[in-house]
């Protein structure tokens, strides 16, 4: 056994066989020979030795464990599972029995059964950190990220000093857009190890999503000091600087990202999205083109490179070429983010139906009568890429308005108060959720009279908001449908919505958006809903801006006519556009792409 432990397998095998000649059939020696056979490629001999050990001693735990692993490797799953279960029967309180079994199941793609085994282990040892860590990792591999997050939360409640746990949990919260949770994890990780570059990066990425770009910058610069060859920190710092409007400085960090990681597609895209491409970029564009053809490239990097080429081609007036690149970009992005999973039209339509059915005129009136009196919330809604960021930039240029950015609050909490299957609304909980929402806005905005919530998809949540906070105001931004949908299709989202990458899905989503907005238009009081057409705002900037500020209920301020001077952080795809003076080049953009519109043609007026 000592020889086996130090890797001297030949000597170990000789000694074990010598022992067996003296004590024939000894189970421990037989298992040892089997393990050596397995490690030296003699799998069939190993199985034979283990089966022989079990004939001599059917209760030999080690033989069952080893045999289960070998049989899994020979694709004899049923036999392998039998021996793994026998090992657990022999040692039902030995957590290693369960972990060994679950690991074999994971290795052979049987993830559902692995989770079941790990849950059994937790029943035996509820506070075992290793089992919880295995469970969290397996659930994450299966895409069951919220369950994985719950497992990490439970684990960290037991072992709060586990740095990798906070990093993993924070990464999950970032992926599912629970940014407050991600910030919490990032701060815990930095507290545990201030010298961890990974902890600093996690915290910085989380802060960037919650408007904390300046603090994020500090952590990223420290992360680079700690680990100068970590390209993720350079890329994240470039994005943070872009959010602050420091585009020239940001480009230097994207160039450093490319120097360390030449295939980083997001860095190339970020450079080109922050300015117009010109003929002077020919060498860089040739490099991007060459890298996009690399067969070893992952789909995410490939998609960013194609988006970069699409944007540059459009800047250069090569519209057919641009659309070809956009098509390749969305194909790669769809594979990366969603694989073969189709967008669930039926589910989304059913949710819209349930919401419309629940928030009738009478029901809204009854709920509004019990609602909160706050006038602080100012929601800016519309289809994504309709101009909501521009409206927020204009409104938040007013000294009495604070920009809250894209808050996921209502989407995170609506499921607690509304049962779509029955249309039932928990009125008491709705008011409680609304109270915490107003408190959150107050914390974000300080003394500001209004705080914006600019998540475009809050158009689906207006019934909840108006029911619970009747004095909340809503600005609905509308844009030419075909321009709007084309913009969605040609935009590289950091985390694309499910419907954003296929023309047919975008058109479907737009029709559902039109349907529910028609309902709110009929349900909400006129003094609570203002509709702004993007094209009218571009053509009549001052008149439309004055109309918006009057609706918000504030005194006029000339700063609202100079939104490009607003120094707030912007972390949406419009990060560059909203820092420019009003321009009209995006109006009727679709006409440049008319021959290649495909399904978007159905949005043309008849």
Image (cartoon, rainbow, N blue to C red):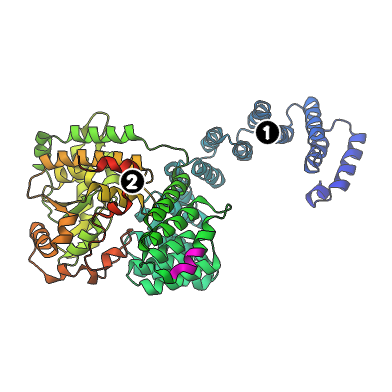
Give the x, y percent position of residue 199.
47, 62
Residue 4 shown in magenta: no
What's the residue at 34%, 39% (across, down)? 504
In the picture, measured across the screen, residue 176 lies left or right of residue 436, that is: right
Give the x, y percent position of residue 336.
47, 47
Instruction: Determine whether the residue tagged by mark 2 lies in a helix, strand or loop.
Output: loop
Q: Which residue is mark 2?
A: 597
What's the residue at 23%, 72% (across, down)? 565
What's the residue at 25%, 39% (across, down)? 511
Instruction: Determine whether the residue tagged by mark 1 lies in a helix, strand or loop.
Output: helix
Q: Is residue 192 visible?
A: no
Please report whichever mark, 1 or 2, sits nearer to the chain's N-terminal start: 1
240 vs 343, nearest the viewer: 343
Callout 2 environment at 10 Å: few (<14), some (14 to 19), or many (20+)?
some
586 vs 102, nearest the viewer: 586
| Above or below for 543 versus 43 | below
What's the residue at 59%, 36% (across, down)? 109
Q: Which residue is mark 1?
A: 72
Residue occupying the far front of the picture: 595
Callout 1 environment at 10 Å: few (<14), some (14 to 19), or many (20+)?
some
Q: Which residues are magenta?
A: 281-286
In the picture, measured across the screen, residue 473 lies left or right of residue 327, that is: left
In the picture, measured across the screen, residue 2 lies left or right of residue 558, that is: right
Give the x, y percent position of residue 183.
38, 58
In the picture, measured across the screen, residue 316 lies left or right of residue 463, that is: right
| Above or below for 349 versus 212 | above
């Amino acid at each position: 056994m000592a020889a086996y432990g130090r890797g001297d397998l030949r000597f170990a095998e000789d000694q074990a066989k010598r022992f067996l000649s003296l004590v024939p059939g000894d189970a421990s020696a037989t298992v040892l020979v089997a393990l050596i056979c397995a490690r030296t490629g003699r799998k069939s001999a190993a199985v034979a030795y283990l089966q022989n050990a079990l004939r001599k001693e059917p209760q030999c735990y080690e033989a069952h464990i080893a045999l289960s692993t070998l049989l899994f490797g020979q694709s004899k799953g049923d036999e392998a599972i039998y021996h793994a279960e026998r090992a657990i029967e022999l040692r039902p309180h030995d957590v290693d029995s369960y972990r060994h079994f679950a690991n074999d199941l994971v290795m052979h793609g049987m993830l559902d059964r692995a989770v079941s085994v790990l849950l059994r282990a937790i029943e035996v040892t509820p506070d075992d950190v290793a089992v919880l860590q295995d469970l969290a990792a397996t659930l994450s591999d299966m895409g069951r990220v919220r369950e994985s997050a719950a497992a990490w939360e439970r684990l960290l409640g037991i072992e709060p000093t586990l740095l990798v746990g906070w990093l993993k949990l924070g990464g999950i919260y970032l992926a599912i857009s629970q940014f407050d949770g991600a910030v919490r994890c990032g701060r815990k990780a930095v507290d545990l190890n201030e010298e961890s570059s990974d902890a600093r990066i996690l915290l910085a990425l989380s802060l960037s999503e919650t408007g904390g770009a300046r603090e994020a910058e500090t952590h990223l610069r420290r992360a680079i000091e700690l680990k100068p060859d970590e390209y993720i920190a350079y890329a994240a710092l470039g994005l943070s600087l872009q959010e602050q409007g420091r585009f020239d400085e940001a480009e230097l960090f994207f160039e450093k990202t490319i120097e360390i990681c030449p295939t980083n597609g997001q860095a190339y895209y970020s450079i080109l999205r922050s300015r117009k491409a010109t003929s002077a970029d020919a060498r860089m564009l040739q490099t991007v083109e060459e890298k996009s053809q690399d067969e070893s490239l992952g789909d995410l990097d490939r998609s960013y490179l194609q988006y970069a080429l699409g944007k540059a081609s459009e800047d250069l007036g090569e519209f057919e070429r641009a659309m070809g690149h956009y098509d390749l970009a969305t194909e790669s992005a769809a594979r990366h983010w969603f694989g073969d999973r189709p967008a669930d039209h039926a589910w989304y339509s059913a949710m819209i139906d349930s919401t419309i059915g629940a928030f009738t005129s009478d029901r809204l009136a009854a709920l509004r009568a019990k609602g909160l009196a706050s006038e602080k919330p100012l929601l800016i809604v519309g289809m994504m890429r309709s101009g909501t960021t521009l409206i927020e930039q204009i409104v938040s240029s007013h000294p009495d308005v604070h920009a809250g950015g894209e808050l996921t609050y209502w989407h995170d909490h609506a499921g607690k108060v509304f049962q779509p299957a029955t249309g039932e609304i928990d009125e008491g909980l709705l008011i409680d959720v609304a109270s915490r929402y107003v408190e959150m806005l107050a914390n974000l905005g300080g003394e500001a009279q209004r705080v914006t919530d600019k998540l475009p998809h809050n158009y689906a949540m207006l019934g909840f908001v108006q029911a619970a906070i009747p004095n909340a105001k809503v600005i609905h931004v509308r844009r030419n449908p075909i321009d709007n949908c084309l913009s969605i299709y040609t935009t590289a989202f950091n985390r694309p919505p499910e419907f954003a990458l296929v023309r047919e899905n975008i058109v479907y989503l737009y029709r559902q958006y039109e349907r529910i907005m028609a309902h709110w238009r009929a349900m909400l009081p006129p003094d609570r809903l203002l509709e702004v057409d993007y094209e009218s705002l571009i053509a009549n900037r001052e008149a439309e801006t004055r109309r918006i500020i009057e609706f918000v209920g504030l005194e006029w301020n000339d700063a609202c006519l100079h939104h490009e001077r607003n120094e707030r952080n912007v972390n949406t795809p419009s990060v560059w556009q909203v820092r420019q003076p009003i321009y009209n080049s995006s109006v009727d953009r679709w006409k440049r792409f008319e021959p290649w519109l495909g399904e978007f043609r159905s949005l043309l007026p008849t």
